[in-house]
Image: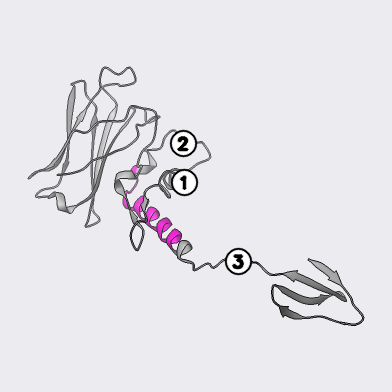
């Protein structure tokens, strides 16, 4: 920016090329314009806002589950912010015309407990039954850890169950919903919470068949 008061030009105002001029306190002021002004409605910014809204909607659709599933977050960070930071933009698929959630990359819990392996997830008359490895020989694992499983249905319904991990090599947990089929399931996850709620495992995305 430059200032001038030229007796030949007098008071200046208007714009030309990449410059804008005006008079302030009796002085001519010349400003350079932004070379590439930002467009709040650019394709990338529209996609960014759409991505943010998708993750917000996901947080809301999971009810209060994520309020307990990020126990190791910093003291000044609320669960909502922990969830948003974990999933934006990593859980967004932008390969198509519009952004969509990639549920296989979504993080719904986070902590230092061992992540749970879920070899089987099937639907039946009673609901969705998940088979998981308890990993009871791991020194960080305790039989009274709580296994939490939930599924979001395409109807918007949320079904959930929770039970102690147990001390058998393999455990099962069922999400009760009569007559459910795999095509009705939007996403399904399982994670472990310590008995006192102070720690969690990273979430395991479950493919329901």
| Discs 2, 3 touching: Cβ within 8 Å | no
Between discs 1 and 3, the one toward the N terminus: 3
Closer to the camera, 71 or 117?
117
Q: What distance separates the C-alpha of mark 1 from that of mark 3?
A: 32 Å
Residue under pointer 1:
81
Q: Position of residue 40 (x, y in %)?
A: 52, 67
Residues rendered magenta in the picture: 47-65
Magenta-drawn stretch contains 85? no
- The local secondary structure at tag 3 comes to loop
In this picture, is 146 found above or below 78?
above
Figure colour scheme? one colour
| Discs 1, 2 touching: Cβ within 8 Å | yes
Q: Main secondary structure of the magenta part?
A: helix
Closer to the camera, 172 or 44?
44
Residue under pointer 2:
73
* Residue drawn at x 18%, y 28% as measured from the top left: 171
Residue under pointer 3:
36
Camera-side mark, 1 or 3: 3
CA neighbours of label 3 inside 10 A, class few (<14), some (14 to 19), many (20+): few
Q: Position of residue 141 (x, y in %)?
A: 30, 21
* Residue drawn at x 37%, y 48% as measured from the top left: 91
Q: What distance separates the C-alpha of mark 1 from that of mark 2?
A: 9 Å
Between discs 2 and 3, the one toward the N terminus: 3
**For residue 174, what is the image quadrant?**
top left
In this picture, is 170 found above or below 203?
above
Direction from residue 182 to residue 7 in the image, left or right: right
Residue farthest along the front direction in this orientation: 17
In this picture, is 139 found above or below 105?
above
């Amino acid at each position: 920016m430059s200032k001038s008061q030229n007796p030949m030009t007098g008071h200046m105002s208007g714009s030309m090329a990449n410059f804008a001029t005006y008079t302030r306190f009796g002085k001519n002021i010349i400003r350079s314009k932004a070379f590439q002004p930002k467009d709040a409605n650019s394709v990338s910014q529209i996609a960014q806002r759409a991505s943010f809204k998708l993750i917000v909607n996901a947080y809301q659709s999971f009810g209060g589950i994520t309020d307990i599933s990020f126990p190791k977050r910093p003291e000044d960070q609320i669960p909502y912010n922990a969830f948003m930071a974990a999933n934006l933009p990593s859980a967004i698929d932008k390969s198509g015309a519009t952004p969509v959630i990639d549920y296989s990359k979504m993080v719904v819990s986070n902590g230092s407990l061992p992540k749970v392996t879920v070899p089987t997830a099937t639907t039946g008359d009673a609901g969705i039954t998940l088979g998981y490895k308890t990993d009871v020989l791991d020194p960080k694992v305790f039989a009274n850890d709580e296994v939490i499983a939930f599924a979001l249905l395409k109807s918007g319904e949320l079904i959930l169950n929770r039970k102690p991990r147990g001390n058998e090599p393999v455990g099962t947990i069922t999400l009760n919903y009569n007559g459910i089929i795999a095509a009705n399931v939007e996403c399904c996850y399982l994670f472990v919470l310590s008995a006192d709620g102070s720690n969690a495992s990273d979430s395991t995305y479950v493919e329901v068949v």
